[in-house]
Image: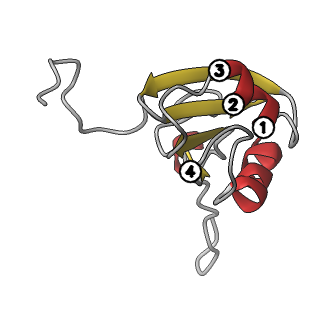
Amino acid sequence: MAQGACRLKIPPPCATPQLSMAVFVNGFDFDTPESAIATHFETIGHISYIKLIGRGTAVVTYDNPDAAAQAVEELNETTIPGNRRYINVRLDSKGGGKGGGKGCGKGGDNGRFSHF
């Protein structure tokens, strides 16, 4: 390389942030059926998966990150039909995109047990 020339630094693939296709939802009535959640969130786009986590909490995964972002914009602080409470909707920070968030770089527990 000639003196004074710059090297192009290409970040490793893991350095590129992945857009989440999942949204974290909480605040809906505890007895809300999964079908009511699906109906409410399908107004934005096709849902590939819904995971009920606990009472009033779920992760809704869309087919693409644009739908997830739109769900946050349009469905946050709305009410699922039949509910009395407003829901909170935000992008899921634990993944939801293809490839997940693990396996990049050094650190972590190197495969050992997680401590809670």
Residue at 59 percent across and 54 percent down: it is: 86
Please report whichever mark, 4 or 1, sits nearer to the chain's N-terminal start. 1
As rendered, which of 94 and 83 lies closer to the eye?
83
The amino acid at mark 3 is Glu
The amino acid at mark 4 is Arg
Image quadrant where one finds the C terminus: top left
Residue at 70 percent across and 37 percent down: it is: 82
Question: Label 1 near label 2: C-beta < 8 Å?
Answer: yes
Please report whichever mark, 3 or 1, sits nearer to the chain's N-terminal start. 3
Please report whichever mark, 4 or 3, sits nearer to the chain's N-terminal start. 3
Residue designated by label 2? 37
In space, the residues marked 3 and 2 are separated at their CA atoms by: 5 Å
Q: Secondary structure at mark 4?
A: loop
Residue 81: x percent and y percent? 74, 40
Q: Quadrant of residue 106?
A: top left
For the residue carrying disc 4, how many other residues have a C-alpha within 10 Å: few (<14), some (14-19), or many (20+)?
Answer: some
Residue 95: x percent and y percent? 53, 36
What number is the disc on residue 40? Answer: 1
The vertical placement of 93 against 112, above or below, is below
Residue at 81 percent across and 30 percent down: it is: 39
Residue 94: x percent and y percent? 46, 38
What number is the disc on residue 34? Answer: 3
Residue designated by label 4? 85
